[in-house]
Amino acid sequence: MPVLLVHGDNALEIDEAVASVRRPFQPADVLTFDGTEASPPSLTEACLTTGLFDPERLVIVHRLHERGKGGRKDADTEAIEALLGDIPPTTTLLLVCKGMAADHQLAASVRRVKGEIRACAMPRKQDLARWVSGRAGRHGARIDPAAAELLADLVGANPLLLDSELEKLATYAGEEARISPDMVETLVGAVPQDSIFALVDAIAAGDRGKALRLLHAQLDRSGSGHVDFALYLIRMLARQVRILLRIRLGREAGRSTSQITSELKLNRYYADRYFRQANRLSSERLCDAFEQLAGLEHALKSGRSEPGAGLDLLVAELCA
């Protein structure tokens, strides 16, 4: 697979395709370029150089299709054509072209050198429910057809948001791993990710008053005292704590921010906020928080705690 072109308007699937191709390579054997700025000679040199730790090397070039935009003649066209036809077998050249049309000249150039082309298109409206059903499996859950249709109607053709909602629903479904229409009606949009970040920020800062206000704002939206919602909120907080703990452990092991982001498959929109929170919370404090969340979940399931009081006490302890 010397040349691979990934293009389309589905940013989620493009990012996943890039991560899949990148995974087998050592970080030191991966070079990344902006195709609108890098010169053909620099790209050629990168493709011809042997990897540091392995003879195999991955060269990733973003936005190469944007060269010569706006009617300007692209003087590098012939050089790029020559580059595509002269990739050594030890190099994989990955062209990442978000928003590129299928009939772009670059696609024809890749076909001429017998490269692989992966089109990642946004699902059409009539295909959304089927797409949602397929994505649910990636989160270890299955979704009822009616629930998939309802989720597609509520969110629309937004793969990133649909996938985020599926992740929340799969978390709520727990061991049963089945998402029903009732779950979608209850939970989609019930706890926006920004609300979880705000609550964790308040806890990290030890601001008990603000944390309790944010907590009660969520409980009021759900109908105060609802056990199912309280359990869902606990799972969302536990998921956040788990991510922050893995970031801390990754940092302690010497991994870079980009490595951790890739390994944890963090949404790029939220990645910076995850790292800021992880910087403010020690591994010990995060482990304690995770144990406290697990303890309250068990107490709620066994009927030994009331949702509102249990969450109030938990948040107060976490802020201490």
Image (cartoon, grey):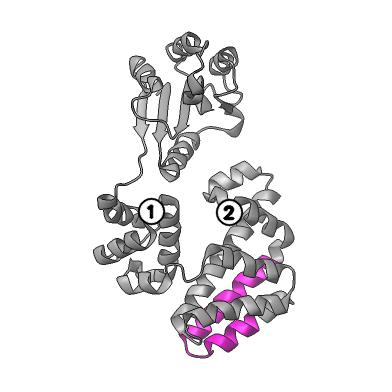
Instruction: Identify whether 121 is placed above or below 157.
Output: above
Q: Provide the secondary structure element on which disc 2 rests.
A: helix
Q: Which residues are magenta?
A: 285-314
**Position of residue 84 in the picture relative to residue 275 (left or right):** left
Crowding at mark 2 (Cα within 10 Å: few <14, some 14-19, many 20+): few
Locate residue 169, reporting x and y percent. 41, 66
Crowding at mark 1 (Cα within 10 Å: few <14, some 14-19, many 20+): few
- Picture disc at residue 169: none
Which of the 4 image quarters holds residue 318? bottom right
Q: What is the total number of numbered labels drawn onto the structure image?
A: 2
Locate residue 147, reporting x and y percent. 30, 66
Please name whichever residue, 176 or 215, is drawn nearer the observer in this view of the structure: 215
Which of the 4 image quarters holds residue 14? top left
Q: Residue furthest front?
A: 71
Please name the predominant secondary structure of the magenta segment in the image: helix
Q: Provide the secondary structure element on which disc 1 rests.
A: helix
Instruction: Identify whether 150 is placed above or below 250.
Output: below
Inspect the magenta stretch and tell me whether residue 295 lies in it.
yes
Residue at position x 44%, y 17% in the image: 89
The residue tagged 2 is 270
Instruction: Identify whether 317 is placed above or below 50.
Output: below
**Position of residue 257 in the picture relative to residue 83 (left or right):** right
Locate residue 254, reporting x and y percent. 69, 44
- Picture disc at residue 138: 1
- As shown in the figure, which amino acid type bears the numbered disc 2? Tyr
Residue at position x 51%, y 17% in the image: 72
Inspect the magenta stretch and tell me whether residue 8 lies in it.
no
- As shown in the figure, which amino acid type bears the numbered disc 1? Arg
User: The C terminus appears in which quarter of the rendering?
Assistant: bottom right
